[in-house]
Amino acid sequence: MSEVIDVAKKDGRWTECPGCQEIIITRKLDELLWVCPHCDHHFRLPADKRVAMLCDSFAPLSLGRGRNAKSASETAVLGGRALIEDQACILGVMDFAVKGGSMGQLMAAHLVSLMRQAQSDGLPFVIFTATGGVRVQEGIMGLMQMLRTVHVRNSLERSPMITIFTDPTLGGVTASFASLADLMLAEPGARIGFAGPRVIEQTIRQKLPEGFQRAEFLLEHGMIDSVVHRRVLKATVAKILRLLKD
């Protein structure tokens, strides 16, 4: 039986939940928006799948032409004009599967472009974060993208910003523009923070509380506004966009 399961997992028919290790039919998971029916674990999603789940329509915005005309597969962020239950916004979705969703110069350029487009169109900017932080391979230039995105975020006057933290959101993205949103939501169980728990424990020489850096812990301590289940996330974002429009 175990051999049959292994084969089914390899060809994609079955998927093992990383939360409870239950084996689930992949087709059923897709119907459940990739939320485990046994333990409610929210699977990580690629950017295109999340856009398909969330949007009624989506028109991607590119960085431009020439050497900066990069795709989502290269910049780890997919962005464009979106309609969510007929509510318009500029949407950005980060993809952890692409270089750990790390923010380098190209990703920051794309994010800046999306924020400025939101300002120009007078639309809210909605960003789904999934990242390990700043792209360390770019050295100080990677680190500077924190300042760059914060500067542009602070210049937005006509465009409310909504951040939806997904698992994981860590490092320089958490410490920069993502935490400056007007409204901050998170998926259940999402890990949100700057440094990892082990690094913090070694630094302060104390044991961290259970659930530290999880979405529910941050909500309890006033760091985010709400934890929203994926089943109702689309409706929740649409409701917020309606309220902002009114």
Image (cartoon, rainbow, N blue to C red):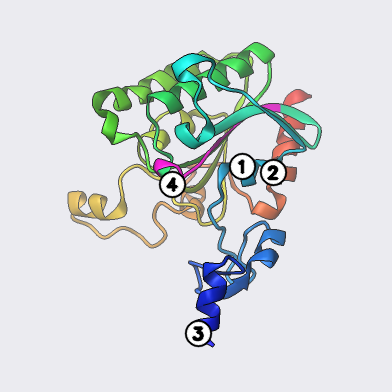
What amino acid is found at the position of numbered circle 4 in the picture? Answer: Ile
Image quadrant holding the N terminus, namely bottom right
Q: Amino acid at mark 1?
A: Asp
Identify the residue position indicated by label 3 in the image.
2
Helix, strand or loop under label 4: loop
Disc 3, SS: helix
Residue in the picture at 49% in, 68% down: 19
Distance of label 4 from label 2 (alpha carbons): 24 Å
Residue position for label 1: 48
Q: Earlier in the sequence, mark 1 or mark 4?
A: 1
Mark 3 vs mark 1, CA separation in Å: 32 Å
Give coordinates of residue 195: x percent, y percent.
Answer: 30, 45
Marks 4 and 3 sit apart, C-alpha to C-alpha, by 35 Å
Q: Earlier in the sequence, mark 2 or mark 3?
A: 3
Q: Residues within 10 Å of mark 1 (few under 14, many from 20)?
A: some
Please tell me in which quadrant of the rendered image residue 245 appears: top right
Label 1 near label 2: C-beta < 8 Å? yes
49 sits left or right of 102 in the view: right
For marks 4 and 3, the one nearer the N-term is 3
Q: Which residue does the numbered mark 4 point to in the structure image?
A: 192
Q: Name the kind of residue labelled 3 in the image.
A: Ser
The magenta region covers 89-99
